[in-house]
Image (spheres, grey):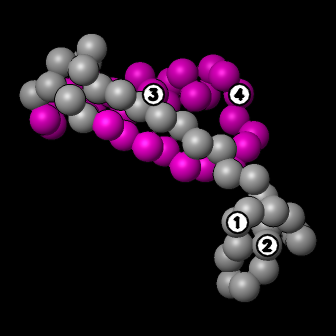
Amino acid sequence: MPFVTIEMLPGRTDEQKKALVEKVTEAVSETTGASKEKVYVFIEELRKDHYAVGGKLLSEE
């Protein structure tokens, strides 16, 4: 039973997220042999004020 967590910044539409989880599920199923029904995908949206690159919060940009 594979578990996949995707962390990304907000801004994607529900349609984009749906397409993403469908493709990730397909890839995991094909490579691990797990049935699609047993692949769990979690999307975590990171707030820009909780994420930094190069010492600067993304909310500062």
Q: Closer to the camera: disc 2 or disc 3?
A: 2
Callout 4: 10 Å neighbours few (<14), some, many (20+)?
A: few
Of residues 16 and 32, the one nearer the viewer is 32
Mark 2 vs 3: CB contact within 8 A = no
Of residues 34 and 18, the one nearer the viewer is 34
- The answer for how far apart the CA atoms under marks 1 and 2 are is 6 Å
- The answer for how far apart the CA atoms under marks 4 and 2 are is 23 Å
- The answer for how far apart the CA atoms under marks 2 and 3 are is 28 Å
Quarter assignment of residue 49: bottom right
Quarter assignment of residue 35: top left
Mark earlier in primary sequence (4, 1): 4
Callout 3: 10 Å neighbours few (<14), some, many (20+)?
A: some
Could you tell me which residue is drawn at 68 percent across and 76 percent down?
Answer: 53
Q: Closer to the camera: disc 4 or disc 1?
A: 1
Mark earlier in primary sequence (1, 2): 1
Could you tell me which residue is drawn at 75 percent across and 53 percent down?
Answer: 47
- The answer for how far apart the CA atoms under marks 4 and 1 are is 20 Å
Q: Is mark 4 on a helix, strand or loop?
A: loop
- The answer for how far apart the CA atoms under marks 3 and 1 are is 23 Å
In the picture of the structure, the residue carrying the numbered disc 4 is 13
4 w.r.t. 26: above or below: below
Q: Which amino acid does label 3 sit on?
A: Val
Q: Closer to the camera: disc 3 or disc 1?
A: 1
Residue 17 in the image, given as x and y percentages of width and height: 58, 28
Mark 3 vs 4: CB contact within 8 A = no
In the picture of the structure, the residue carrying the numbered disc 1 is 51
In the picture of the structure, the residue carrying the numbered disc 2 is 57
Magenta-drawn segment: 3-32
